[in-house]
Structures are given as structure tokens and as C-alpha cells.
Image (spheres, rainbow, N blue to C red):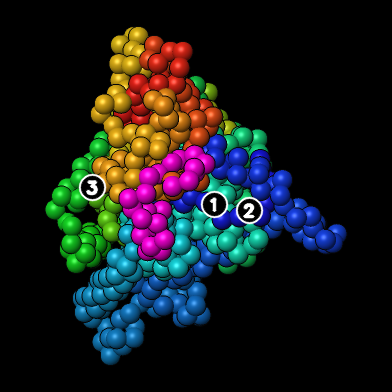
Amino acid sequence: MVDMETTPTRSRPYGPLELIDWDREYLQLAESRKHEAPKTTFLRQLVHSNLHWILLISSSVAVALLTIAIDYISMYLHGLKTGVCRQNVLIPAYECGDLADWSTYFLFFTKSAVLRRINDFIVYILIVLVLALFGALLASKHHYIAHGGIPEIKSILSGTNIPDFLNINMIMSKVASLVLVVSSGLFLGIDGPLVHISMGVMQFFINLLPLTQNEAVKREYLSSAVAIGIGLAFNAPIGGVLFGLEQIHSAFPVDKLMWNAFICSTVGVTVLQKLHPFMEMHIDDMFTVSLKNNWLSYETLPYMFLGLLCGALGIFFCKLNIYFATFRQQRLDNDKLKIVEVVSIALAGAIVGQLSSYSMFSLPKMLQQLFNSCTRDSDALLCSKDSGFPWKLSGTLVAGILQSFLFSAYSYGCNVPGGLLLPSLVIGGSVGRLVGVLLEVAQNHLITSALHLQCLNEKKCISVASYAVVGAGSFAAAVFKMNITMVVILFELTGAVTYMIPIMLGVFCARFLNDMIVDQSIYEMWLRISHLPYVAPNIGDHLSNPEYAVKTCASVMRPTEDIQVFEDGALTLADIEKAPEMNGYPVLRNGELYGYVTNYSLRKELTYLKEQGVVSFDTLVTFAQAPPGYHTLEHLVTKLDLLQVVNGDTKLLTACQIMDQLILGCVFVCYTGNYKLQGIIFRDMV
């Protein structure tokens, strides 16, 4: 990890959606360190050498406090739809033992059950509409408030410049909008937005402290902010670290990235656990594991079947979500329509939710109910005392699956902030719970079978809650294409060490199905339809079949004749201004490659020169040291020694590996034996 140093403002800014020049960034950092003034006192030296600790710890504490506020306020507003706590109006409804519904205040003069029910329904719907409306209005103020933000984060950490994405004012607006949206009952989680918020807070501290503004080093530290968001969202510090490694691919050293993420996650979750008055994401006291409900060897096939089932449903969920997103892009391009859409979904969800008490819970409470282990005397919502087939319980679960599946698939992508990881766990958990209930019914009818002789307690051969846990992990693994992270997050949520193997079996089957059919996570699908630049990791792996293995760089490159090049010393400023728009332009000198200049930095320089009026646009331009009568643009050029050059006979796979390892947007193809430019291969072409 490069130490954080104070560096001067970069000489060449990056344009919107432009890939940063990693080599240039690290070279500038090294140069700035050589010329850095020595610290005058021991205290200054001590503070300066520990700035990265201050950054990581302060960011983690700040995000933890924000998470507590988000969680508490959203819990309170979500419960406010059903009533107010008599003993203390500040206690959320779900934590109150003495809840007064709204009829107690509005219809105190009558005891009519029908009128009271109608009154409670109207108040419930009105609160939902108000919360959804104001959440959507806040989100409409800035494009990046909407959605989760993880696709954009993947793009940023791969090297893309996205201006204003981490602006602190926008981040605080996202916090407020997220609270309102989650409280309204939309089937969205806080996980994705919390990662975005974590990065925005860390960016704020980077700007606040006397730290480097070097784009490469900033991304090293912003990568660790991912662990804060996921760790806090699920009270799972190790899961947060693994999420950053498994989902947010980067080229930074893994050991140092893990260390920074470990610090952030540990500090953040510690603050959350000690200061949060009501912890929702804490289930290990409900999901109990003992020798009497340990999993049995014959359950291996049901667990694997559940993994395949949830994997197939997860893939269908991704495709349905992308279909809805594409439809929305084509039909709902008006801000007012987007707001109406959000309010309509919230209204529909509230009406449907009134039909089932299970659907009226918040998503964390739903997950708690799904992972709850039933006993003979249990009166929990998802526990059945029926001696026959549990029709009511099965119907509740089927309705919950359909509602959460359809509403989550449509809601993720609406013009409001929201995450998809928690809804995915709820959907998969519901499917798993239903499978577990059916297997339990079968077990009760086959209790004398030899399969059940190994049960110590014949009525607990099947642990219904364990199938909910396996289903949750399997569905999420198929949607997000993650394996280790999901296993660890579920372990941290439930403490179910005994069920690690069943969870791993389910996740394995679901992930295997994803790799076979789509081989993409939902985030990568969103990157594609959002047209965001993304330097995908290991692109060479996708070109390993024989058709591509024999391709050469010359067969896929854009030849010199099809691109705009600048011959050094042969053009005026006016000629350059008239050049067609491209990402960047190769600079040739005596017919050979000399360097590369980006379109954004070039246009910015031309605008500056035109405003200053000190140089005639008929002046000849050089990209090297200027002789008399020339104007130099040398400071804009990335020189040949920092460019990656291959010859036309180089295999395409080799060029892909170069772009992978060095995180490059393009490589230059030159003729063998010299630097005469033959063409360019851009990453998006591959």
C-alpha cells in the first residue's frame, strides 16, 4: 500500500467516465514524495505518518453512527404505520409491548371493529404514500441518489472517473431518501446504498484531512469502505471484508486491502453493537442448533435440490429485473412519471401486504421469522400446530414468495435508493422455508422409515429453519455470483456452525447454475444496461475457447486509418480543435508512436487557451519541448514509456492479460522492429 502523502494538484484532470492512468498516478505520487518538505516537529511527523489510521477509524465511526440513525428512524417510521407505543412514543412499534393502534386516538368514541379496521387501514395507506412520495422527491434531485450504487462503485474502483458520485451533500440526501423509502415498505434493503454512503463519507474525510488527492491511492482506501457498508448492514464484519474482496474486484494488494477493510469493519460493527438501542439483524438467539436438530446425511440431496431450485429462481429474478429496467428506460423518461411509479408500487405493496400479517413486517423482521426454529409449543407466525397438512402456513409462504419476488424485481431500479441483498435473502429464505415445511410433512408421515432411525428426537429430524438459511444463501449466490461471502454472512447472522456444509452445498449448486447459464451477477448486468465503463476482471478467461485462442491483435484492432492521430509539429491549435471526438488521440513523431493525449484534457486546455487569448489558434503545436514559434502541449501527453505496446502477431489473450494486470483501457499495436503505429485495441472492443 502506498503511504498517503500530500501531493500537488494533478496537471491533467480526468473527464466524466474516463479511465484513470494508473501508471501516471503512481509516477506523480513518487515524484511528489521526492520533493516533499520534511516535517518540522515530532508531533507533525507522528500525525502525518498515522493519517491513514485517522481516516479509516473516523470514517468507520461516522458511518456506524449514520447506520444507527438510519436503522432506528426507519424502524420507527415503519412501525408508525400500525400505531404508537403507549409506554414511550419513541420506542418503535415492533419493540413495544403495549401498542396503541390509530383507532385508539381517532375512533375512541366507538367500539365498532369494522370502523376501527377501516380507520387503521386508511391511516396505514396514507403514511405509506407520504413516506414513498417524499423519498421519491428527494431521490429525483440527483441522479446518483437512486438505486443502490454498487454497479457505479465497481466501475469507479476499476478506474473510471464518475464526477459527483461521492459528493457529501448528495450522500446526505441519499441517507434521508433511504430512510423514507425503507420505511414505506418497498421491498428494498439498505445494503447497497450503505456501501455508497460509506464511500461518500470516506471521500469526505479524505478531502477534510491533509491527504493525497492522487486518484490511484484514493481508490485503494475507498475499496476498504465497502466492508463498512456491508458489515454494518448485516452486523457481519467478516462478511463485509469478504464482500469487498469477492464482489468489488480491484488490482490492489490483497493483504493490505484486507487489513484496511478489517480495521474499518471491526471499528464500525463494534460501534454499532454497543450504541444501537434495537438490533434487528441479530438472529442467532432464534436459530438454535443442537444434537437434536443436527442435519442428517440423507438431507444432502434435498439441500442440493434446494440450491438448484433457488439458483434457477435467482437467475430468473435477474432476467426479470433487467427486463423491468429496460422497460423503464424506454417508457419512463420523465421525472414526474418516475415519482408516480414509486408511489404506485408502494401503494400496491401496502394493499397486498394488508392481506398477510407476515408481509407487513420489515425485511429484517421477515428474515428473523424465516430463520426462527419452531418448537411444539411455538406460536410464531411461521410455525404450524396442524396435525395434518399445514395449508395456511404453506399459503402464507407461497404468497410471501410471490409478493417479495415480484415487488423486489420491479422495485430495484426505480428512482429511489435501495439494495437487493437483503430482499434476496428473504426471497430465498421463503423458498427454503416452504421446502422445509413440505419435507417436515413427509417426515411426519414416514416417521417409521429407516431413514429416520438416526434421529435422537423423532419430531425434529427436519429443521425447517435450516432450509430457510440454505435457501437464502443459495438464492443470493445466484443473484450476486458470490459464494464464500454468502456462507460467512449467514454464519454470522445465525451462528449455525453445524449447518455450514448444507449452506455451502446449496451455494455451490446455485453458483454452478449461474456460471453455466448467465455467468454474470446482477451488478454486472446493470453495468451493461447503464452503459458504464467497467474494466472487468480476468477478461482473458472469457476468451479461452479455441476460436479466440488463435486470434492475433492485428485481427481485432482498430487500424490507424480508422482513427484520428496527431503528427507532432504538423498541426495548428485550430486543426486540433476540429478533430473528431474520440476517447483519446495517439501522437506520432516522424511516423512513430510518441505518446497519447486524452480528449477531455485536450478540450479543457483548448478552452483555457481560448479564454485567456494569449495564443493564436493558427500557431503550430508540438507535444514535446517547444522550439520558437510553437506552442507546447507536452504536459498533456502520456509518453511512450508509459504506454503498453504490442506487435500485430501478439495473441489477443496476451493483450487481454496485459490489460487485466495493469488495468488499462487500451493497448497500442505497432509494427515489429519499430514503433510505427498499426492500430489500437480498446478494452470495450474485446
Helix, strand or loop under label 3: helix
Kind of residue sitting beneath label 2: Thr
Q: In the image shown, does 166 or 174 lie closer to the viewer?
A: 166
Q: Which residues are magenta?
A: 604-629
List the single residue furthest toward the front.
628
| Residue 14 position in % (x across, y down) | 44, 49
Q: In the image shown, does 660 or 486 lie closer to the viewer?
A: 660
- Label 1 to label 3, Cα distance in Å? 38 Å
Mark 1 or 3, which is nearer the eye? 1
Residue 451 seen anywhere in this rendered image of the structure: no
Q: In the image shown, does 296 or 245 lie closer to the viewer?
A: 245
Helix, strand or loop under label 2: loop
Query: Are the two marked residues, 2 and 1, in contact with CB atoms closer than 8 angstroms?
Result: yes
Residue drawn at the location 26% of the way across and 75% of the way down: 126
Residue drawn at the location 19% of the way across and 51% of the way down: 328
Residue highlighted by disc 3: 325
Residue drawn at the location 20% of the way across and 42% of the way down: 323
Residue highlighted by disc 2: 7
Residue 491 on the magenta span? no
User: Circle 1: is it few (<14), some (14-19), or many (20+) Cα within 10 Å?
Assistant: few
Q: Is residue 349 left or right of residue 146?
A: left
Residue highlighted by disc 1: 10
User: Circle 2: is it few (<14), some (14-19), or many (20+) Cα within 10 Å?
Assistant: some
| Residue 644 position in % (x across, y down) | 48, 26
- Label 2 to label 1, Cα distance in Å? 8 Å
| Residue 129 position in % (x across, y down) | 26, 71
Q: Of the two numbered discs 1 and 3 on the same chain, state the one appearing first in sequence.
A: 1
Kind of residue sitting beneath label 1: Arg
Residue drawn at the location 32% of the way across and 59% of the way down: 143
**In the rendered image, the vertical position of residue 356 relative to residue 153, given as above or below:** below
Residue 582 seen anywhere in this rendered image of the structure: yes
